[in-house]
Amino acid sequence: MDKSTLRKLYKEKRNALSVEACEQGSLQIANACQKLPLWSYSNFHLFLPIAHHKEVDTEPLLTLLQGRDKDVIVPKMEEDGQLSHFLLTDQTPIRNNALGIPEPQKGIAIQPHQIEVVFVPLLAFDRKGNRIGYGKGYYDRFLAGCKSDVVKVGLSFFKAHEELLPTETTDVGLDYVVTPEKIYSF
């Protein structure tokens, strides 16, 4: 299957989930993240979910990170196809952009090389750690600019796709994917 077909398939699978299944799955994913070997790090990049696309709700994970006194960095999409990154504080104004993505409006800018762990949104992944996102390349460009040892953690409601996903030279693989049932390590 090509990437476009896989995107459509996994969007349909996610849209078929009930609100309750998304809430429960998101909580299970956050709880499972506590088992990852990440907790010695300080700077965590966390995407804010598009609620109407039934993405994994990262609020339970945000609560967990803040409870452990971790610095949480959130992204903002820029017109040039890049992400900018801001430290999330009580004063950080968050608004939905035109795509419905919650984003910081301003704040303390953080550079990609300062980030130690990135929680990555995705539609599908395979057993080798390849992922398929929405196809705009924001996260691949961002991850390419991070330190080589940045820990990349995908979050998904679904198990690994059985067949290997099609990849391109610009795709950046994951180190882990956390689902409600399992932690995959690559």
Image (cartoon, rainbow, N blue to C red):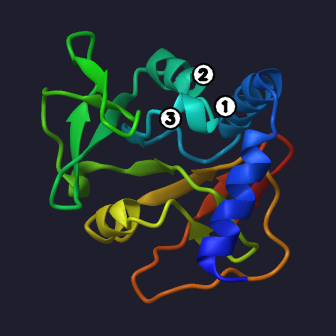
Q: Kindly identify the amino acid type of the residue bearing the numbered disc 1.
A: Ala
Q: Secondary structure at mark 3?
A: loop
Q: CA distance from mark 3 to mark 1?
A: 17 Å
Image quarter hosting the N terminus:
bottom right
- Left or right: 45 in relation to 90: right
- Going from N to C along the chain, the mark reached first, 2 or 3, is 3
Q: Which residue in the structure is indicated by mark 3?
A: 50
Q: Secondary structure at mark 1?
A: helix
Residue 72 x, y percent position in the rendering: 36, 31
Question: CB under 8 Å between callouts 2 and 1?
Answer: yes
Q: Residue at x 29, y 22 (%)?
A: 95
- Going from N to C along the chain, the mark reached first, 2 or 1, is 1
Q: Residue at x 15, y 61 (%)?
A: 80
Q: Residue at x 34, y 61 (%)?
A: 138
Q: Is residue 166 above or below residue 161?
A: below
- Left or right: 95 in relation to 109: right
Q: CA distance from mark 2 to mark 3?
A: 15 Å
Q: Which residue in the structure is indicated by mark 2?
A: 60
Q: Secondary structure at mark 2?
A: helix
Q: Which residue in the structure is indicated by mark 1?
A: 30
